Every structure is written in structure tokens, then in C-alpha cells.
Amino acid sequence: MDTSEALRLEEQLKRFIRWNRSAHPPIDGLSRSAISVLAATVRAGSPAPRPGDLARELGMTTSNTASALRELDAGGYVTREPNRHDGRRVDIVLTEKGRAAMAERRATKSSRLHQAIEATLDDREQRELLLAGDLLERLATYPAS
């Protein structure tokens, strides 16, 4: 693949990401940053993530992450609890409200994507898309420079 083809692929991926983001139902007026932090908290699972871990994963500043966490805490989506092993640290714990909000959002996104795939791609193209997804996962492991 030459450089122009790689650039074309990058633009296609960006267009798909914009389309996919447009399907995201809002969550009670939460900011995009707060929703990103909430989603990262869900992905992190157990043990509970720390604010710094979330900031690194999302490429956000610690102050922006802290602001998003205050928003989520005030809305009842997460709680901040002292770490059991180190009282100086704080763990982010997902509440039932946060879990339910993300489950509903994920279901809406998955349904839209499934409908688009079924309506747009034939069986062969659907199999190719799955293979392309596997290739994208491999590319995502390439070390950042």
C-alpha cells in the first residue's frame, strides 16, 4: 500500500467514526468528555480504574479527566472511593445508573451498525468487513512513534 492509499484509508476510517459517533444517543446532557470517561470506566472493569489511568487511556489531560469525573459523580454515574490499599489514591466505581446508561447506548449503536451492515453489504462483503476488522486490530498494536 502506498502513502496515498494509506491516506485514503485514514479518511475512510475518519468518515466511518464520524458516522458512528452521530448515532450515539446523548446521555442526560453529559459532555462528550464525560461520556468518553464513562465508556473507559466500563471498559476498564475490575479493578476500578484510577483517574490517571483513564486520562492516559483517553489521551486527555488530568484536569479535563477530573472535570469529567466531577460531572459523572454529580450525575450519579460513578462514585469516587478511596483505594483500599492506598488511602491517597482514588478508585472510580461505576454505579448502576452508569452501567445502565452505557448498556442502553451500546445497544443503540450496535443495532444501528447491524442494520447498516445488513442493508448495505452482501454476505461476501460482510465476511470481508469482519476480516478487515481483524486487520485493523492488528494495526492498532503497532507501536506509536
Image: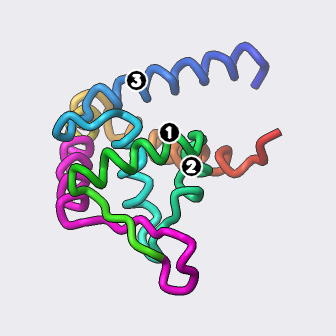
Query: Which picture quadrant has residue 136?
Result: top right
On screen, 17 above or below 66?
above
Of callouts 1 and 2, the N-terminal one: 2
Query: Do callouts 1 and 2 mark residues in contact (Cβ within 8 Å)?
Result: yes
Please name which of the two marks, 1 or 3, marks the residue nearer to the observer. 1
Q: Amino acid at mark 1?
A: Asn
Q: Which residue is mark 3?
A: 18
Q: Out of 94 and 136, give the one closest to the viewer.
A: 94
Above or below for 80 versus 13 = below
Image height check: is 131 above or below 46? above
Q: Residue at x 21, y 50 (%)?
A: 75
Q: Residues within 10 Å of mark 1 (few under 14, many from 20)?
A: some
Quadrant where the C terminus is found in the figure: top right
Q: Amino acid at mark 2?
A: Ala
Q: Secondary structure at mark 3?
A: helix
Residue that carries the numbered disc 2 in the rendered image:
55
N-terminal label among 2 and 3:
3
Residue nearer the viewer, 25 or 41: 41
What's the residue at 19%, 43% (across, down)?
Answer: 108
Decide which of tag 1 and tag 3 comes sooner along the chain. 3
- Please name the residue that numbered disc 1 is placed on: 64
How many tags in the picture?
3
Percent coordinates x, y for residue 10 in the rendering: 60, 23
Q: Which residues are magenta?
A: 83-111
Labels 1, 2: front one:
1
* Residue 98 belongs to the span the image colors magenta: yes
Element at label 1? helix
